[in-house]
Amino acid sequence: MATQTVPEIVLYDLACTKGICFSPVVWRIRLMLNYKRIPYKTVFVEFPDIQSVLKELGIEPNESASGHIKYTVPAIHHVPTNIYMMDSVPIAEFLELTYPDPPLKLTSELGREIETKARAVAGPAMRLSVTPREMNILSPRSQEYFRRTREATLGRRLEDMLDPDEEEKLWDITESNMPAVSELLHTHEAEGPFVLGSQPSMADFLIAGSLQSTRVIDEGVFQRISKFPGYKKIYEACLPYMEKKD
Ligand SMILES: N[C@@H](CCC(=O)N[C@@H](CS)C(=O)NCC(=O)O)C(=O)O
């Protein structure tokens, strides 16, 4: 008779038509759960249902300075203590405290530097290429929500972002500024494949999670970003922690 592991965590994740995780922020937490081998189960939630589902669980939303209430995933339920929480940073801190073995370094100076530089260098091209293609893996209800909220924020139609000239221009700029990021990614190359050397840290999970998210959305964009030196080695080193995708 097969034995079933009782989940300690319920992970609230974003639903897509592929039935696997595609949110970069949720991937960070999923990578951590997989790395620490914490038994968990996933509840996939459609974009327009996030607010009602998390509200029903009694989770406190974030409130912006203008009073705008925002519920987001990842959110978790820690079954043994009946704690519910939202937001990747406090969730990661809670998991590290509750499940310290194997340890995961959540912050480091090099990790912060990489995050800032990678966002500045690759962020614009990634946003332009990924955002409109995200529509392709959403259900009709989530597509409607995604279009309405993103077009309001971006001030343009999602289809207009798929402009080949604009895309090529941004990827060219990314390519010319990339050596500074690659150099940082190789700082501890002699000690191992991860940002800090032989052991993974949250800095690796940020990169691997973002690449895996891109891969689920569009293989072509994933190939574009992962060809830059440093990215693929981290992604591949994190593959053992990306096996459980749902
Ligand atoms: N600061 C949050 C951000 C999480 C976030 O932005 N999640 C997105 C999914 S990738 C979300 O739930 N969006 C809800 C919405 O757009 O209404 C965290 O670190 O957890």
Image (cartoon, rainbow, N blue to C red):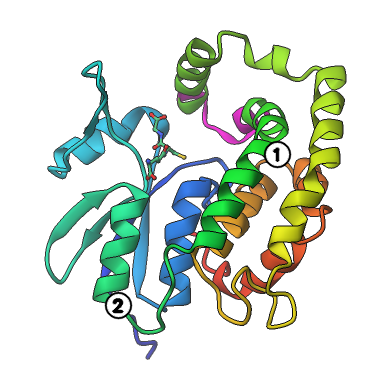
Which label sits in the foreground, 1 or 2? 1
* Residue type, label 1: Val
Ligand 1's image quarter is top left
- Dividing the picture into quadrants, the one containing residue 138 is top right
> What residue is shown with label 1?
121
* Residue type, label 2: Tyr
Disc 1 on helix, strand or loop? helix
Q: Look at 61% across and 56% down and name the residue there.
A: 207
The x and y percentages for residue 206 are 54, 55
In this picture, residue 13 sits left or right of residue 69? right
Disc 2 on helix, strand or loop? loop
Q: CA distance from mark 1 to mark 2?
A: 34 Å
In this picture, residue 112 sits left or right of residue 51? right
Q: Are marks 1 and 2 in contact (CB under 8 Å)?
A: no
Q: Look at 35% across and 53% down and name the residue there.
A: 89
Magenta segment, which residues? 133-141
Structural crowding at the residue carrying mark 2, measured as other residues with C-alpha within 10 Å and reported as few (<14), some (14–19) or many (≥20): some
**Residue 241 position (above or below residue 215):** below
178 or 235, which lies in front?
178
The numbered mark, 1 or 2, whose residue comes first in the sequence reads 2
Q: Quadrant where the N terminus lies?
A: bottom left
> What residue is shown with label 2?
99
The answer to whether the residue bearing label 1 lies less than 8 angstroms from the nearest atom of ligand 1 is no
- Dividing the picture into quadrants, the one containing residue 212 is bottom right
**Residue 11 position (above or below residue 241):** above
The x and y percentages for residue 16 are 52, 41
Q: State the residue lying farthest toward the bottom.
A: 1
Q: Look at 60% across and 48% down and name the residue there.
A: 213
Queried whether the magenta region covers residue 189, the answer comes back as: no
